[in-house]
Amino acid sequence: MSKVRIGFFDSGIGGISVLSYARRRLPGADYIYYADTDHVPYGTKSPEDILRYSDAAVGFLAEQGVSAVVVACNTATSMAISYLREKYPFPIVGMEPAVKPAAAAHPGANILVCATPVTIAGKKLHTLIENNYPSEEQPDLVGLPGLVTFAENGIFDCETVCGYLETVIDRTKNYAAVVLGCTHFGYFRDSFRDLLGDIDLIDGTEGTVNRLISILSQNSIDVPDAQGSTAFYQTGRPVTDPAVLAYYDQLLTRSEILK
Ligand code: DGL
């Protein structure tokens, strides 16, 4: 069976949490991960810039001969997914905040949806909420750009992160669940729990990888059984620095531990 290359793309390290889960479910694929480190964060940029950067990222992955791409970024999905799907010939899986599973698991409860400011302001999220919640039970929304900065700078200690979270999250709301609507946020599950107790933290990782698996099968793309590889790129440049690769490896593991 021939090799299958799957491209992953995020503004930075957030999508590594999705890649980690995909590698567990589809270990035989070869993965190319594109972190747009020159332009991170996306969550505070203009829609035009996000579209341009996303196009460059997927264009690069197309040149590497990928069979499918996962846009492991809620912000890029929100701003660019329709354009990308129209332009490129391979299947493209996007990510959106897991509002639907949260509504199904916690009917009538207080829910908080966290994402980047761009995703929070975007039409896609508001349509998703309208389709899943009656108007009198809307979830609360909060933009947490600070978590993207922490993640990109390797700051995960609960004291710093909780200090930030408590300035933006109203604990008196007794949320039953928090939707982690940005792939960078999954690395902070322990801090969310430190601040809010043992609440349900819901992200789109599993749904996205399930979708990838079903799209590959619909397109008759078979993933071989043999162990595949993973290559990392930063805005199109191969990552060869052992320290950076070791950090990415740490994030792959952190994503597994914090699930
Ligand atoms: N990880 C991205 C997301 O899922 C965006 C983070 C950023 O660049 O602001 O939305």
Image (cartoon, grey):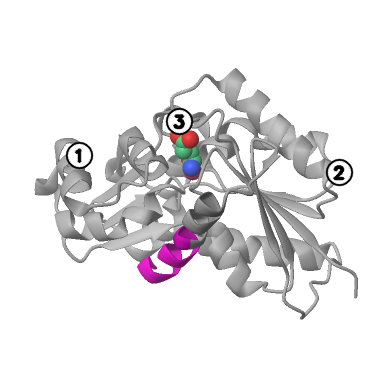
In this view, the mark in front (1 or 2): 1
- Report crowding for label 3: few under 14, some 14 to 19, many 20 or more residues within 10 A (C-alpha): many
Q: Is residue 1 above or below residue 35?
A: below
- Residue for point 64% across, 35% down: 235
Is 140 in the magenta?
no
Residue 107 in sight in this render? no
Residue extending farthest left: 172
Q: Which residue is mark 1?
A: 164
Q: Quadrant of the C terminus?
A: bottom left
Q: Quick one: 70 or 40, which is closer to the camera?
A: 40
In the drawing, does residue 158 fall left or right of residue 225? left
Sequence-wise first label, 3 or 1: 3
Q: Is mark 3 within 8 Å of ligand 1?
A: yes
Question: Which circle marks residue 43 in the picture?
Answer: 3
Give the CA distance from mark 2 to mark 3: 27 Å
Q: Which residue is mark 2?
A: 89
Three-letter amino acid code of the residue under disc 3 = Gly
Q: Which stretch is magenta?
A: 250-259
In the drawing, does residue 33 fall left or right of residue 216? left
Q: Position of residue 64 (x, y in %)?
A: 82, 47
- Residue for point 51% across, 55% down: 248
